[in-house]
Image (cartoon, rainbow, N blue to C red):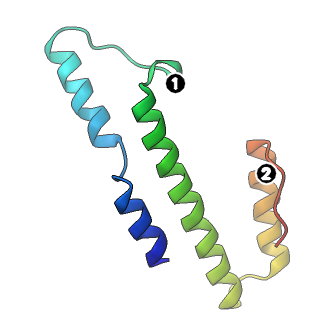
Amino acid sequence: MSNIIERYRAGGGHSRSRLQQRARWDAEIGHFRVRDSMDIDSEDQVSERAELHFLAALVDELMKALLEAQVMNRAQLQEIENAVSARTGAAPRAW
């Protein structure tokens, strides 16, 4: 798991502080407005995508650890995977 965290840190972290700074600047010059997902700069999209991949990898590692520690069994993990798959529209992975 430390590998994932190190790769994430090497990638520049997440974009929340950048977005907060931009909102402050916009408010100072009087152009503050709520941005929807289509109005985010491509740099922010890349950063947010990297954060999502990091979080997905972290959840995957946690689920593997739960399986190895016998806290949950494969059927329980598959139920979680199926529920996530139904919400995201992606094909479920097999546990």
- Along the line of sight, the residue nearer the viewer: 78 or 17: 17
Count of labels shown? 2
Q: Amino acid at mark 2?
A: Ser
Q: Is residue 74 above or below residue 26?
A: below
Question: Where residue 73 sits in the image (x, y, percent)?
Answer: 79, 82
Give the side of residue 45 with respect to residue 67, left or right.
Answer: left
* Residue at 58%, 64% in the rendered image: 57
The crowd level at tag 2 (other Cα within 10 Å; few <14, some 14-19, many 20+) is some
Q: Position of residue 51 (x, y in %)?
A: 47, 50
63 left or right, relative to 38 = right
Circle 2: element type: helix
Question: Counting residues from the N terminus, which is met first, the one under dot 1 or under dot 2?
Answer: 1
Task: Check the picture and name the quadrant holding the C terminus.
Answer: bottom right
Q: Nearer the viewer, residue 61 or 84?
A: 61
At 47% from the left and 34% from the top, the residue drawn is: 45
Q: Going 52% across and 24% down the picture, which residue do you hit?
A: 37
Q: How far separated are the C-alphas under marks 1 and 2? A: 22 Å
Residue shown at the point (44%, 77%) measured from the top left = 2
Picture quadrant of residue 53: bottom right
Residue closer to the observer: 70 or 12 = 12
Image coordinates of residue 52 in percent, x first then y, are: 53, 50
Residue that extends furthest to the top in the rendered view of this protein: 30
Is the residue 60 above or below the residue 52 in the image?
Answer: below
Q: Is residue 42 left or right of residue 69?
A: left
In this rendering, is residue 1 above or below 51?
below
- Mark 1: which secondary structure? helix
Q: Identify which amino acid the numbered label 1 is placed on.
A: Ser
Location of mark 2 (residue): 85
Structural crowding at the residue carrying mark 1, measured as other residues with C-alpha within 10 Å and reported as few (<14), some (14–19) or many (≥20): few
What residue is shown with label 1?
A: 37
Q: Quadrant of residue 41?
A: top left
Q: In the image, is residue 64 above or below residue 81?
A: below
